Image: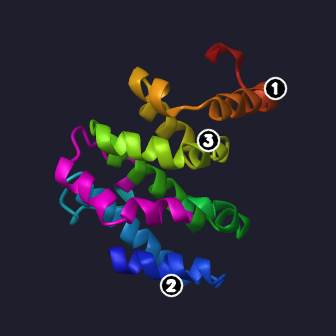
Amino acid sequence: AFEQLCVISDKFMMNQFMNEDDRNSLTFILQNIIFFVGDIDSNQDLKLALILSVDAPKRKRQKLLRELGILDQIFYLLSHFLELLNTQTSTNKYNLQLCYRIVKLSFKNYRKNQEYICSNFFSLMQNHIGHDIFAEDALTSLLNNNQKLLENFVKDSEINNFISLVRQNMPHWDGQYF
C-alpha cells in the first residue's frame, strides 16, 4: 500500500494528471488503510470506511503509519487538495475525506502521533476547514480535552489564523455553536 501511495503522490509531484484508474486505486488503498488501522476484516464493504466505528485502533499499526511515512504521504495528498477538488469529481472529495479519516484514526488515543501531527501539519489542517473534507472533525478530535497539545504545539500564528477563519465564516455559521 505504501509503494502504491508513493506512486500516486509522485504523479502529483510531477504535475501529472490523475486518471480514473489512479483515483480508484487511491480510493482502494485509503479504504484498506482504514480497515488495517482499525483491525477490521477487510472482507466488509470498503465503502463503509468513512462510517465504521473504531473504538480502539491498534497502536502498533498507528505507529507504522508514522514510521513508514504513510502519514507524510497522506498529508502530501492533502496539501494538494485544491488541485483534487478543482477537478470536480466526487471520487476526489471522497478520497480527501478518507485521508482525514486515516489522520483521525492515526492519533486516536496515541499521544506520539498527536504530537507529530500537531507539530508538522496543524496549519495545513486548519486551512482545510470549511471544505467539507472532515478537517474540522479531525482538528476537533485532536484538540478536544487535550490541554498539553494546545499549550505545547499550537502557536500564536495558528490562533490568529483560527480567529481570522471564524471572522471570515461567521455569517455562514449557525450561532448556536458559539
**What amino acid is labelled 1 in the image?**
Pro
Of circles 3 and 2, the one toward us is 3
Residue beneath disc 2: 21
| Real-space CA distance between mark 3 and mark 2, rounded to the nearest whole angstrom | 30 Å
Front residue of 107/101: it is 107
Residue 141, compared with residue 15, is above or below; it is above
Mark 2: which secondary structure?
A: helix
Front residue of 24/122: it is 122
Q: What stretch of residues is rendered in magenta?
A: 49-77
Disc 3 residue crowd, few under 14, some 14–19, many 20+, Cα 10 Å: some
Mark 1: which secondary structure?
A: helix
Q: Quadrant of residue 171?
A: top right
Looking at the picture, how far across and down is residue 77, in whole percent? 54, 65
Residue 57, compared with residue 169, is above or below; it is below
The quadrant in which the C terminus is found is top right
Residue beneath disc 3: 126
Of circles 1 and 3, the one toward us is 3
Colour scheme: rainbow
The residue under the point 53% across, 81% down is 10
Residue beneath disc 1: 171
| Real-space CA distance between mark 1 and mark 3, rounded to the nearest whole angstrom | 19 Å
